[in-house]
Amino acid sequence: MNIENTKKYLLILLFAICFTGVQAQNDLISLRSVSDSEYEIQSTNGLPFTIVLENSNNDGQYHLPSGGSTIFKTEDLIGNRSTLRIIFEKEMYHSLEDKLIEQYDSDVQWITNFLEIKEKDKKMFPTRPVFSDVALEKLKSKVFDYATTDRKEDYFNQWIEKINYSVGAVDYFRKLYAASNGENNEHRYNFEPINIHAALRR
C-alpha cells in the first residue's frame, strides 16, 4: 500500500462522513440487501477490516478487503439477535503508519534540501510526525526562518501542506486503532455492535 492509497482513503473517508446514505451504519461500513437471500457489507472508505459476526448460525471472523465487500446469507441470521462489529487490525494500522512516517521522512529531506538547512540543524525535526498543536506551530516557525527568498518561501508553503497532512493522518489512524481496541474516543461508535436485522430494514 503506497502513500497515494493512504491519501485516497482519507479523502474517501471525508466524503463518506459528509454524504453517507441510509445504508451506512457508521462512518466505516455499510450494509445492504443484494437479494432475498443475501446481504453485503462494504467498507465506505476503502480500508480493510475484520468483520465479527455474533449470535448467528455463521459466527466467526471474516475479512473485509480493501475497496471491496463481503457477502453473507440472510438465512444464517437468528431473528433480530444477530450482530456484527468490525476490528481495525494491528497489522493494517502499523502498515499505514509506517507508510506515513516514510512519507514524512521524505518530506523532511525535501524541505531541508530546498531551504538549505544544515545537517546539524535537522535535529529540529522529530523522527515521527506526532505533535501537539503548539509543538507543530513552533516547528513551522523554526523552518520559516530558513525561507529567506520568495522561492524558498514557496517551498515552505508546499511543505506546510505536506506536514499538516502527515500529522493529521497519523493522528487519525492512531485514534481509529485505539477506538478499535476499546478506547472511548470520537471514533469508538464505529466499532460498537450493529444489529444486522435492524440495519437491513432501514
Image (cartoon, rainbow, N blue to C red):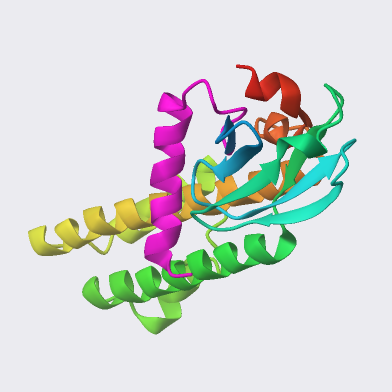
Q: Is residue 103 above or below residue 73?
A: below
Residue under the image location 31 percent in, 51 percent down: 161
Q: Position of residue 21 (x, y in %)?
A: 47, 23
Does residue 61 appear in this view? yes
Q: Position of residue 131 (x, y in %)?
A: 56, 51
What segment carries the magenta color? Answer: 1-28
Number of numbered labels in the structure image: 0
In the picture, residue 96 is in which quadrant?
bottom right
Q: Is residue 79 left or right of residue 175?
A: right
Residue at the far front in the pictured view: 36
Residue under the image location 38 percent in, 52 percent down: 140
Q: Position of residue 162 (x, y in %)?
A: 34, 57
Nearer-the-camera pick, 35 or 132: 35
Residue under the image location 67 percent in, 34 percent down: 190
Q: Is residue 159 left or right of residue 39?
A: left
Magenta residues, dominant SS class: helix
Does residue 131 appear in this view? no
In the picture, residue 78 is in which quadrant?
top right
Q: Is residue 69 left or right of residue 185?
A: left
Magenta highlight on residue 124: no
Residue at the far bottom in the pictured view: 119
Residue under the image location 30 percent in, 59 percent down: 159
